[in-house]
Image (tube, helix red, strand yellow):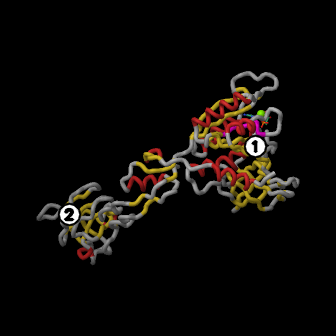
Amino acid sequence: MIPLEEARAHVLERVGLLDPVEVALEEAVGCVTAEAVTAEDPIPSFDNTAMDGYAVRTADVAGADESSPVRLEVVATLAAGTGDRPEIGPGQAARIMTGAPVPPGADAVVMVELTEAAPADPEDGDGGVLVKAAVPEGNHIRRVAEDVQVGDEVVAAGTVLTPALVGVLSSVGREGVRARRAPRVGVLSTGDELVTAPTPLAFGQIRDSNRPMLLAAVADSGFVPVDLGTVPDDETALTAAVRDGAARCDALVTSGGVSVGDFDLMKQVLDGLGAMRWMQIAIRPAKPFAFGLVEGTPVFGLPGNPVSSLVSFELLARPALRSMMGHRLLDRTRVTAVADVDLRRRPDGKTHYLRVAAEYRDGAYRVSPAGGQGSHQLTAMAHSNALAVLPDGDGVPAGGDLTIIPLGEVPAAG
Ligand code: AMP
Ligand code: MG
């Protein structure tokens, strides 16, 4: 048996980087940038108001307060988007809406809540505005380049694009970006015993859980799933399916046929098609694993037991697929948790990954087993939201600390 780290390193050394492509912003979230993006204009590109109110000259309102408001003549109404630049003279103000340019002559904005309409003037008819507070120079003005200066690198190469970064790219005038897109990952199940869902089962047959599950895992991780169907335990058929899939996809994930049974043919198949390494990894579940390159396309040969398949995908295929698209953070976040019950095990030279239910309670993540821990017992995996990492040894007593890998949202109790 080899340590998981060795298997992981073997795989990561052999998967390449996908070529960057031009990705439209609408499709860019989750992609990893392959260029640095700099700003050609400042943001904001003009002084503008952060509030609805009045653009004023601070000197005019210096003495204003609730009991002695200052009356100003309102010479313009400025909405966001206006190109108007009316000069504000002494004793004057402009009604101004959030985002509108601050007009020349004005040096502050008084928010509308600190003003009221002045009673109509008997001479000119228009009442103007009563300002009921003094404001400092620059009040509520968003200055040119306060967010971004010309030449600023707003997105570095190798950045995972979040919704906010997509917004930043749009704000500097980009409609697309050079990025590495998600790999197209072909998924196929192997096994003579497999039938697809609606067919009645003959004795000895089972339904295929791995292919739909792994297609979902691929999609859930942000990659593009490609369904390559179910293939019997036949070397010729398997060889054809793997060769065709490898030609059509950036990577393949297969399940079954990597163990030591008489009909576990994936090893021979991958050997015949290119460089392959078969590994026995010191983990439970998911000990057997095969990794091959078929015409340069990585093939992850996962074990057939459904829990093993998914754990193997998590620990080996997912980080490698992320690496192909340029991610630097390959693994899921790990956190420390407290065992709610005894999590006992026997020493066997392996690290165990238990399927657990985690919740955040009384200031800590707390875990208990999510059900039966057999590698065929997929329902426990389905009801879990984390893997608990139990290093070789006797396990962890109730109340003890351990490392967990959350695979989904962790609810907070109480
Ligand atoms: P294998 O790795 O091919 O030796 O399969 C190990 C166990 O997993 C056997 O009990 C298989 O029947 C089962 N198995 C293999 N492939 C699948 C699948 N796609 N869906 C559900 N169970 C599977
Ligand atoms: Mg099999």
Q: Quadrant of residue 207?
A: top right
Q: Is residue 254 shown in magenta?
A: yes
Q: Quadrant of residue 222?
A: top right
Q: Is residue 144 above or below residue 188?
A: below
Q: Position of residue 253 (x, y in %)?
A: 66, 40
Q: CA distance from mark 1 to mark 2?
A: 73 Å
Asked if disc 1 is less than 8 Å from ligand 1, the answer is yes
Residue 138 tag number: none
Q: Which residues are magenta?
A: 253-258
Q: Is residue 136 shown in magenta?
A: no
Give the secondary structure at mark 1: helix
Asked if disc 2 is less than 8 Å from ligand 1, the answer is no
The amino acid pointed to by label 2 is: Val
In the picture provided, is 165 more to the left or to the right than 385? left
Say if residue 256 shows up in the picture. no
Q: Position of residue 106 (x, y in %)?
A: 24, 69
Mark 1 crowd level (few <14, some 14–19, many ≥20, 10 Å Cα): many
Mark 2 crowd level (few <14, some 14–19, many ≥20, 10 Å Cα): some
Residue position for label 1: 308
In the current view of this chain or complex, which residue is farthest to the left?
123
The amino acid pointed to by label 1 is: Ser
Residue position for label 2: 74
In the current view of this chain or complex, which residue is farthest to the right?
346
